Image: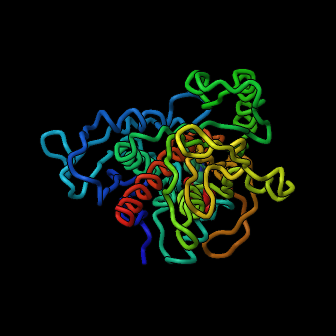
Amino acid sequence: MSFNTFGRVFRFTTWGESHGPALGAVVDGCPPGLALSEGDIQPFLDKRRPGQSRFTTQRQEPDQVRILSGVFEGRTTGTPIALHIDNVDQRSKDYSEVAKAYRPGHADYAYDAKYGFRDYRGGGRSSARETAARVAAGAVARLVIPEVTILAWVEAIGGDAIDPANFDAAEIGNNPFFCPDAEAAKRWEALVDGARKAGSSLGAVIACEASGVPAGWGAPLYAKLDSELAAACMSINAVKGVEIGDGFAAAALTGERNADAMRPGNDGRPVFLANHAGGIAGGISTGQPVRVRVAFKPTSSILTPVETVTREGEATEIMTKGRHDPCVGIRGVPVVEAMVALVLADQKLLHRAQTG
Ligand SMILES: Cc1cc2nc3c(=O)[nH]c(=O)nc-3n(C[C@H](O)[C@H](O)[C@H](O)COP(=O)(O)O)c2cc1C
């Protein structure tokens, strides 16, 4: 009933709030015998960590992970792996306004309507601090699928998209936006700075590609690989849209243009001439790269006053002070990668369980 757990065979549960002492994940169902240390997890947390540029929140969290269980002599034992991350830079006084009135676009009103009681400090459980736990769990998932390479990047900010002709994977780590187009990254500096200084915020589109996924992972109908990926990515805070392959654009294509034509390959497997399907057909991977696009809405905590109501139902305006991401999609990149890894690890184990 409480829905803090995701996955079927490779399962993880996250726990913790923004201003609590710590947060973390428990990964259950991980195969035994995998080499695992904090060093396998930390680089991914470092990518998501706040305060690394002026384009993200200035909250300073080292996000150092500790493995509390499930590992003996450097290898997974098959028992639950508890991952622990301290919160060290809370500033709860910034949230006195949020205690009294609801931020439109954030979870404040909905949490009150459901539970009648909420931890408003930093957004409590609805804070994206929770995504650190997903990223830690995702790093463990990657060890289950060494045959798969997962790469995500920002494709557009505030409606300004990269030029696909400029795509250079090596650029993604060279700028604060995870942007594969050096020219777009330059433009985005002014764009995001402008939004931040104006007390506003911007949305973003993240693209993610998983290559090396063999044909056969996933399931027909009620656990389609498409729907598992959509559920995983849609569960990320601030995500409002997920597309697989061409997604909505496929609806504008004709059948012959949308078809991923096939030719015989040398190894008995077909060679595909296109990948409109995003590497999935009938809910099952085809062996082509799995492609997902994720739309993040603009941050709702902004310095521009917005009309709202108090907890008592009186009209007021709210202007959210404190430290916030001017574009949450930027730090969403490692989170999307983690969720894709978690789904694929689960699907690999499910495929093995059914087909041997
Ligand atoms: C990496 C990341 C960072 C975020 N940072 C902020 C933030 O600084 N301020 C904020 O208001 N929302 C932030 N969010 C979004 C909220 O957590 C989210 O909007 C809120 O939980 C409401 O959920 P919903 O947008 O999915 O409806 C962030 C989301 C992500 C993924």
- Tell me what residue is drawn at x 56 percent, y 41 percent: 333
- Tell me what residue is drawn at x 62 percent, y 47 percent: 291
48 or 255, which is in the foreground?
255
Which percent across, then down, holds residue 112? 55, 73
- Tell me what residue is drawn at x 33 percent, y 45 percent: 85
- Tell me what residue is drawn at x 72 percent, y 59 percent: 317
Residue found at the far left of this picture: 73
Which percent across, then down, holds residue 249? 80, 53
97 or 244, which is in the foreground?
244
Is residue 212 visible in the rendered image? The answer is yes
Which percent across, then down, holds residue 50? 49, 37
When asked about the image quadrant of residue 263, the answer is top right
Q: Quadrant of the C terminus?
A: bottom left
Q: Quadrant of the N terminus?
A: bottom left
Is residue 98 visible in the rendered image? The answer is no
When asked about the image quadrant of residue 6, the answer is bottom left
